[in-house]
Image (cartoon, grey):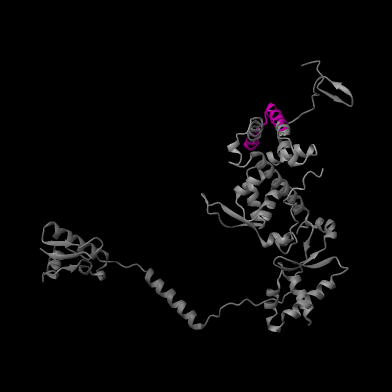
Amino acid sequence: MILPDIVEALLLASPEPLDERQLLSLLADEGVDRGELEAALARLRRNCEGRPLELVRVAGGWRYQVRREFSPWVSRLFPEKVGRYSRALLETLAVIAYRQPVTRGDIEAIRGVTVSSQIIRTLEAREWIRVVGHKEVPGRPALYRTTDKFLADFNLEALEQLPPLPADEDKTNTD
Amino acid sequence: MTGAVVAKVRGTPLHEFPENLYIPPDALRVVLEETFEGPLDLLLYLIQRRNLDIMAVSVTEVTEQYLGYIAVMERLRIELAAEYLLMAALLAEIKSRLLLPKPAEEEDAEEDPRAQLVRRLKEYERIKQAAVELDGLPRLGRDLFPVLLTADLPPRTPNLPKVTVDQLADAFRQVLVRAERGRSHAVPRESLSVRARMVRLLESLGHGKPVAFERLFDPGEGRAGLVVTFLALLELCREGRIEVLQREPLAPIQVQLR
């Protein structure tokens, strides 16, 4: 058996992304080193060219996925899964993603409205956010952060890859 | 009411609402709550509708419009979220401050509420934009679908612990023992006299030295025996034949003859 095939098999059969460390430990018996693994991953990525699937690195590891262009057809397979999120939910998620760690109070200050507990519960149930501690102020409110799953589900490897916010400094009346 | 034109449909004036036209009383509230994510969003809408830069906005003008909106909503008996009213109050405050001459010494006492509002509006605008872009990112389950193959693995024999004949025999022995215990048998009641026990206690305290309370009891006697000993102790105490001592709280209790 050749290494790229074995790595491909592992990635295809794993329900969650696998990172280099996990792959190396799965291949410890074969004495695969990092360089060989990286070469195999590069080869697998090339093999996807011209095919409807791609091998991407997201937070948490490498994942085979169907290319985005095919989503109109693939989503017909899972009609009930395609949910649209409300603006309130997306804005809450955006505040947490761009300003983390934040408390509910911080979110309310930015959005100017009360944070709905339902939204926080939904985001937690999606495993997109989690409590990472408590702010040392009266009431010790929970501090929220986004998770690796959030990054992986949005096809990102790190927070730095989030779309940049509009510049902080004003462009002074360019209308 | 009759005679007034309530609406025009393709240019034809209507003098009363068609009977089958039903506007749910909550319709406008739904519009308001669905369209605007709170007072900051409504303010941004008012500013952007006029194609203005946040920095260049006339607070006076925006305040008028904002309050106008609030008034319409109140007339329609829409219960406004408290946040909208709070913003109305803030705008009114800023407006009134702008009308008043500014005392010189208060210049930099606190952040100008207008500057603060502008900062909040800009931050909200950024987050609003970020939310749109976040939603635009390809998302797993919506735009991207993980490839997952079912691995055809050979059936794995479950790793169950082995049982030896000895263990089986031992288990059976325990069943027998339990069956034995289940048999009924008569238990004769042992007669225990408090008097007799009092005599025995006096004997064991006979040498005059204090004895630890616990040492007077023989756990082997079982519950009834322990109770009788305790009753005998109480009785001896009552009769003033013995003394019960404790040097300090939580120290061991000692018993001695009087």
Q: Quadrant of the N terminus of chain B?
A: top right
Depth check: give the residue in front, A88 or A29: A88
**Image quarter for residue B35?**
top right
Depth check: give the residue in front, A49 or B62: B62
**Image quarter for residue B102?**
top right
Depth check: give the residue in front, B204 or B199: B204
Which residue is drawn at the image coordinates 60% and 49% (left, top)? A104
- Residue A115 visible here: no
In the displayed structure, would residue B40 be above or below residue B77?
below
| Residue A147, position as x, y percentages in the image | 66, 60
Is residue B86 covered in magenta? Answer: yes
Is residue B212 covered in magenta? Answer: no
- Residue B155 visible here: yes
Which residue is drawn at the image coordinates 79% and 27% (left, top)? B21
| Residue A69, position as x, y percentages in the image | 85, 59
- Taking the view exactly as shown, the residue that stands out farthest to the front is B104
| Residue B64, position as x, y percentages in the image | 71, 30
Instruction: Write down the region rendered in magenta.
Output: B64-88
Depth check: give the residue in front, A166 or A127: A166
| Residue B234, position as x, y percentages in the image | 17, 59
Which residue is drawn at the image coordinates 70% and 75% (left, top)? A23
B15 left or right of B238 in image: right
Magenta stretch secondary structure, dominant: helix
